[in-house]
């Protein structure tokens, strides 16, 4: 956006994992369900996980919401998910809070689809394993086998397995339940990720409202339609901010601005759920797009690692070549003008 908006001041831009086409007012419109579909792809056999994992996660929500509808069921969920006293489910609506917390971990793990352990998704405070969503799927499968083998009913076994699976993110320290011995639904992976989430939430409300939905059919989650009115009301309530839903497209121009731009190199990871909102094709001779196979969010901006696959190394080389070319072009332009 900086290069597109101020080309006289910025000679070129590397735009890594930049979902600049994930806003309202675009033509063609952004698919609000594509983020959740991408997370689901990452958990599936095609994305390196397993189709059984997708089916298990999708099936677990029905059982969770059924238990959340009664006082006894909520007591069971409190015990099953080892919730801290402040996070215990007391009303039916609280089951949705638990479901959202579980779902959020999968979004983070999908973004963190790297071929090596990384602290990136935990903001430097702890590490997730390589391809953490695949690790979650393996945990879910093992937990289902173990609990059903012990006589636990299938529906309860699914939820116990889900707890074990999201522990890859929420219990990355490996303690019995979590760092405090229980799970706090108001906290993300750690305090750093919670703060990061608050900052992004403000930015979402103030400047970058991105539509998002899930349907439980094309993805492995539960129905969550995009309700712009509810989103706006939530932003007013949380931040006392009046969202401008079409502002990113109005201000930065969407596809039309891309077609008029130059010297931008876009990169997206195949496994990054933000990729569907990014630029996934070459727009012109100097506005180029690279899709990195088997990669997550921002991995091309990491320091080099011996485990980096060849396609990732090739994209980094292309980025360096592009920066060199922009410098040469700028110097020639400056020399000519003088």
Image (cartoon, grey):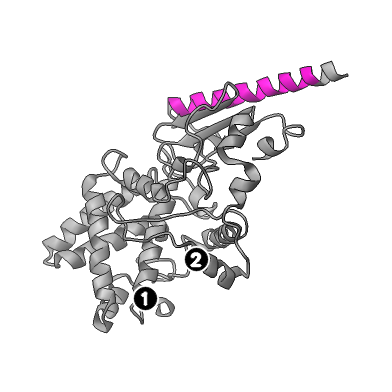
Determine the main secondary structure of the stretch shown in magenta.
Answer: helix
Residue 67 at x, y percent in the picture: 25, 74
Regarding residue 132, the answer to whether it shows in the image is: no
142 above or below 48? below
Q: Quadrant of residue 258?
A: top right
Q: Which residue is mark 1?
A: 93
Mark 2 / mark 1, whichever is N-terminal: 1
Q: Quadrant of the C terminus?
A: top right
Look at 50% across and 33% down and name the residue there.
Answer: 305
Residue 314 at x, y percent in the picture: 50, 23
Q: Quadrant of the N terminus?
A: top right
Q: Which SS class for mark 1?
A: loop
Q: Along the line of sight, which residue is nearer the eye, 142 or 271?
A: 271
Kindly indicate whether the residue at mark 1 contacts the one at mark 2 (C-beta within 8 angstroms): no
Q: Which mark is residue 10?
A: none
182 above or below 18? below
Could you tell whether 271 is left or right of 46 in the image? Answer: right
The number of callouts visible is 2
Q: Along the line of sight, which residue is nearer the eye, 242 or 102?
A: 242
CA distance separating discs 2 and 1: 19 Å
Look at 64% across and 27% down and name the residue there.
Answer: 263
Residue 45 at x, y percent in the picture: 26, 41
Residues packed near mark 2 inside 10 Å, few (<14), some (14 to 19) or many (20 plus)? few
| Residue 286 magenta-highlighted | no
Q: Which mark is residue 229?
A: 2
Residues packed near mark 1 inside 10 Å, few (<14), some (14 to 19) or many (20 plus)? few
Could you tell whether 306 is left or right of 331 in the image? Answer: left
Give the magenta-colored segment's residue range. 310-333
133 above or below 80? above
């Amino acid at each position: 956006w900086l290069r597109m908006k101020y080309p006289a001041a910025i000679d070129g831009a590397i735009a890594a994992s930049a979902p600049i086409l994930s806003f309202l007012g675009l033509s063609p419109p952004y698919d609000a369900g594509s983020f959740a579909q991408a997370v689901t792809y990452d958990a599936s056999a095609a994305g390196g996980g397993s189709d059984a994992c997708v089916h298990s996660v999708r099936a677990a929500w029905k059982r969770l919401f059924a238990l959340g509808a009664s006082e006894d069921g909520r007591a069971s969920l409190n015990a099953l998910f080892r919730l801290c006293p402040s996070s215990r489910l007391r009303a039916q609506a609280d089951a949705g809070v638990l479901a959202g917390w579980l779902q959020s971990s999968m979004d983070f793990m999908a973004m963190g689809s790297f071929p090596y352990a990384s602290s990136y998704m935990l903001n430097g405070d702890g590490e997730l394993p390589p391809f953490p969503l695949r690790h979650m799927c393996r945990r879910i499968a093992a937990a289902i086998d173990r609990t059903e083998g012990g006589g636990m009913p299938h529906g309860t076994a699914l939820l116990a397995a889900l707890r074990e699976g999201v522990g890859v993110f929420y219990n990355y320290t490996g303690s019995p339940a979590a760092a405090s011995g229980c799970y706090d639904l108001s906290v993300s992976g750690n305090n750093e990720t919670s703060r990061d989430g608050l900052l992004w939430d403000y930015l979402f409300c103030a400047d970058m409202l991105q539509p998002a939905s899930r349907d439980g059919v094309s993805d492995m989650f539960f129905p969550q339609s995009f309700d712009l009115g509810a989103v706006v009301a939530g932003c007013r309530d949380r931040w006392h901010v009046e969202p401008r839903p079409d502002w990113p497209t109005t201000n930065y121009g969407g596809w039309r601005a891309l077609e008029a731009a130059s010297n931008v190199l876009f990169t997206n990871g195949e496994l990054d759920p933000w990729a569907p909102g990014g630029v996934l094709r070459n727009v012109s001779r100097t506005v180029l797009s690279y899709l990195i196979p088997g990669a997550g969010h921002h991995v091309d901006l990491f320091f080099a690692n011996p485990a980096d696959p060849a396609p990732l190394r090739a994209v980094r080389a292309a980025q360096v070549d592009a920066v060199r070319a922009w410098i040469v072009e700028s110097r020639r332009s400056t020399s000519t003008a003088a």
